[in-house]
Amino acid sequence: MKLSDIRLAVREMQLWPAKRMGQNFLHDKNLARWIVDQAQITADDYVVEIGPGLGALTQLILQQGAHVLAIEKDARLANFLRARFNCPRLELLNMDALEFDARSLLAHRNVKLIGNLPYNISSALLMKYTKQPDPISLLLLMLQREVAKRLSASPSTHDYGALTLRVQLHHRVKYLRTIPASVFFPRPEVDSAVIAILPRDPAELPQRDDQLLLKLIAAGFAQRRKQLQKLLREHINDWDTAAHALNIGPNARAEELSLLQWIALVNFVAPPSTSHAQLTKDERFPVVDKKDRIQRYAKRSEVHGNNLRHRAVHILLFNQAGEVYLQQRSRSKDRHPLKWDSSAAGHVSAGENYDQTARRELKEELGVSVALRKISKLPASEYTDQEFVWLYHGTISGDLTPNKAEIEQGVFLPPPIVDGWTSARSEDFAPAFIECWRVYRQKGASEQRISERTLQRLYVLSALIN
């Protein structure tokens, strides 16, 4: 929209752009087209636009054939956009983008996020929409130039800090260009910038404890002019030994360490655990026939190497809200590393039955013991890696303690979101989980139908008696 069009629209809506909501409308059409061009949008994309305002970018995105989910907090602007665009590919939500459940985006395959982020909540929005698991393949954001420089900063620069490392831990950030204040109405007090944020390959960086890493980073940048040996004394008693081992200067400050050096530091403090699978490569499994009858016993390496039929358990653990816990398998797993999987799973070893294995795996992987209910038995097939699988259900009321040697990360998700995610991107999951989840959902639907029929019969019987 031209500046004159913006002024007219603002007058007609009796809307004076609110500074507290970051309402500064872009009126440079060439710049708007350049921004959209950077996203390389296609008709297959699902584009989330935060703060569409008067639709300067929305119109150009729709012209590319994409589906657009526009999130606009101001009801007046939301109503204006509904009237301006009559397009079935535009879904408009009148709400605060900080309150939107970003997990629902897992149900879409090609997700891109574009937005002119309000300056006062840009960091909060970034943390929300880069949270793991992250379905967004590109974040193309226009925000305050100062924040953009911090996000894309390199070590030993003034802008490099805790926010830099927090975002770059899972993403790569590229500063694209500075945007002058003059292209907005009303004109903001500072310049803006456009950045592109792309997800990293999870295997690109070494294994580490992310929670401890972020804790050390926060402590290190709490007083950035102080030396790390003083700020991290609580975590590292012998700083000289740590600095020498990691080739870090003894008087180093937080801003001097690269992301890889920070990871090396946290791994010095808490070395990554050796995978249980690596420790048990000589573990013996029962090899079974087509009817799950034990024929003999063989080492894990032989069973997996020759795709022999064997036994396993999968456990679906739910919290009090009805959300299921999914784990991302450790990168050191011999099969399906970094894929998402059931809450806990494992092989039946020699001398164990299915129930014993389920209880053991739950304790080893998540540190809990809860009552388990059998759901169904899956036959051995290529989809289960030739495993006969007993599927279990459990409910937890307390906290989990994921085994970092087995689990990269974990998350509780509502079942409908898992349905959408598995449908949109089945390649994100271990194949056996896809089968287990399908059986669980079918079983639940079947039990629901049986329950409904039972209630109907009781109702009829009650009516006859009365």
Image (cartoon, rainbow, N blue to C red):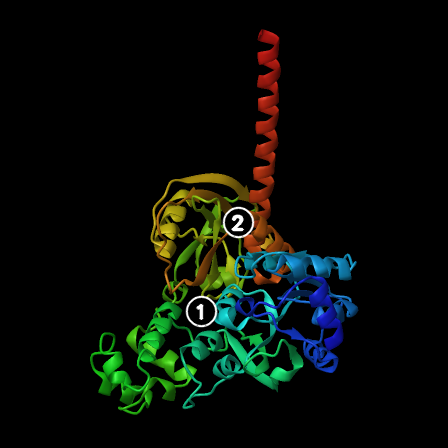
> x, y (%) of residue 379?
57, 46
Q: Residue at x 52, y 48 (%)?
A: 388
Tag 1 residue: 332
392 vs 444, left or right, is left
Q: Callout 2: few (<14), some (14-19), or many (20+) C-alpha neighbours within 10 Å?
A: some
Measured along the vertical axis of the image, is residue 441 above or below residue 193? above
Give the camera-side residue of 412 and 271.
412
* Whether residue 214 is situated above or below residue 430 in the rendered picture: below
Between label 2 and label 1, give the one nearer the viewer. 2
Q: What's the mark number on residue 414?
A: 2
The mark found on residue 216 in the picture is none
**Secondary structure of the residue carrying numbered label 1:** loop
| Percent x, y of residue 453 | 61, 25
Q: Does label 2 or label 1 sit earlier along the sequence?
A: 1
| The one of 337 and 295 positioned closer to us in this rendering | 337
Q: CA distance from mark 2 to mark 1?
A: 28 Å
